[in-house]
């Protein structure tokens, strides 16, 4: 028996697919497909949170550049150039100082893409009936499980 995927809720082997304790023998699976389900209430807030994270991560360097450019154009004398360089330098130094702390918001952003904003469903035809096998917003997990089920069915048939 080959194990293609396993987590606490799903196990896909060369013999069977088990989802939350329900066992589907691979030999009895007639068809496997996926589709995008309807969205959940959390997808909108997840998109807004992702947008806020991108804005926060990119705001410091952009703010320093905008301040430096506006200072240069506001006054044409040499003193404004020195002030603009100081503001730009402070922005660069601030970004370098905060760089070690960027790991946390970047990991949040990474996780938001893993979790996804769309609901994905895996469907099977088992004993002549179409059944929903799995419904998740976690895009990475969905892809791994779907490919594992495909492999199990391909190898069995």
Image: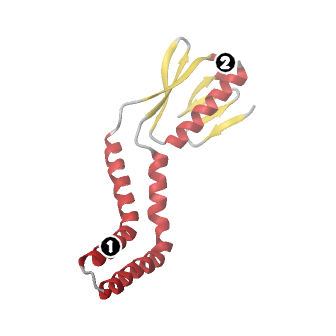
The answer to whether marks 2 and 1 mark residues whose Cβ atoms lie closer than 8 Å is no
Specify the quadrant of the image occupied by residue 32.
Answer: top right
Which one is in front in this view, the residue at disc 2 or the one at disc 1? 1
Specify the quadrant of the image occupied by residue 73.
Answer: bottom left
Q: Secondary structure at mark 2?
A: helix
> How many other residues sit within 10 Å of disc 1, few (<14), some (14-19) or many (≥20)?
some
Q: Secondary structure at mark 1?
A: helix
List the residue tagged with mark 2. 27
Q: Residue 46 at what x, y percent from top left?
A: 36, 49
Is 53 located above or below residue 153 in the figure?
Answer: below
> How far, Cα to Cα, is label 2 from label 1?
67 Å
List the residue tagged with mark 1. 69
Left or right: 107 in relation to 8: left
Name the residue rendered at 32%, 87% in the picture.
Answer: 78
Left or right: 144 in relation to 93: right
Name the residue rendered at 69%, 26% in the picture.
Answer: 15
Name the residue rendered at 32%, 73% in the picture.
Answer: 69
Q: Residue 56 at what x, y percent from top left?
A: 36, 64
Q: How is the image coloured?
A: secondary structure
Which is nearer the eye, 143 or 81? Answer: 81
Is 156 located above or below residue 48 in the figure?
Answer: above
Is 136 located above or below residue 52 in the figure?
Answer: above
For this orientation, the residue located farthest to the bottom is 79
Q: Which mark is residue 121?
A: none
For this orientation, the residue located farthest to the top is 128
- Is tag 2's residue or tag 1's residue first in the polypeptide sequence? 2
Q: Quadrant of the N terminus?
A: top right
């Amino acid at each position: 028996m080959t194990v293609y995927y396993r987590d606490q809720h799903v196990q896909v082997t060369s013999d069977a697919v088990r989802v939350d304790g329900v066992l589907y023998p691979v030999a009895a699976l007639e068809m496997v497909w996926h589709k995008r389900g309807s969205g959940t209430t959390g997808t909108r807030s997840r998109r807004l949170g992702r947008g806020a994270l991108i804005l926060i991560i990119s705001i410091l360097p952009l703010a320093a550049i905008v301040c430096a450019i506006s200072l240069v154009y506001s006054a044409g004398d040499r003193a404004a150039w020195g002030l603009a360089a100081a503001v730009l330098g402070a922005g660069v130094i601030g970004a370098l100082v905060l760089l070690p702390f960027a790991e946390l918001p970047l990991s949040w952003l990474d996780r938001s893409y893993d979790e996804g904003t769309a609901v994905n469903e895996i469907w099977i035809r088992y004993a002549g009936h179409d059944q929903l096998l799995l419904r998740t917003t976690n895009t990475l997990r969905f892809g791994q499980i779907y490919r594992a089920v495909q492999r199990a069915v391909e190898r069995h048939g």
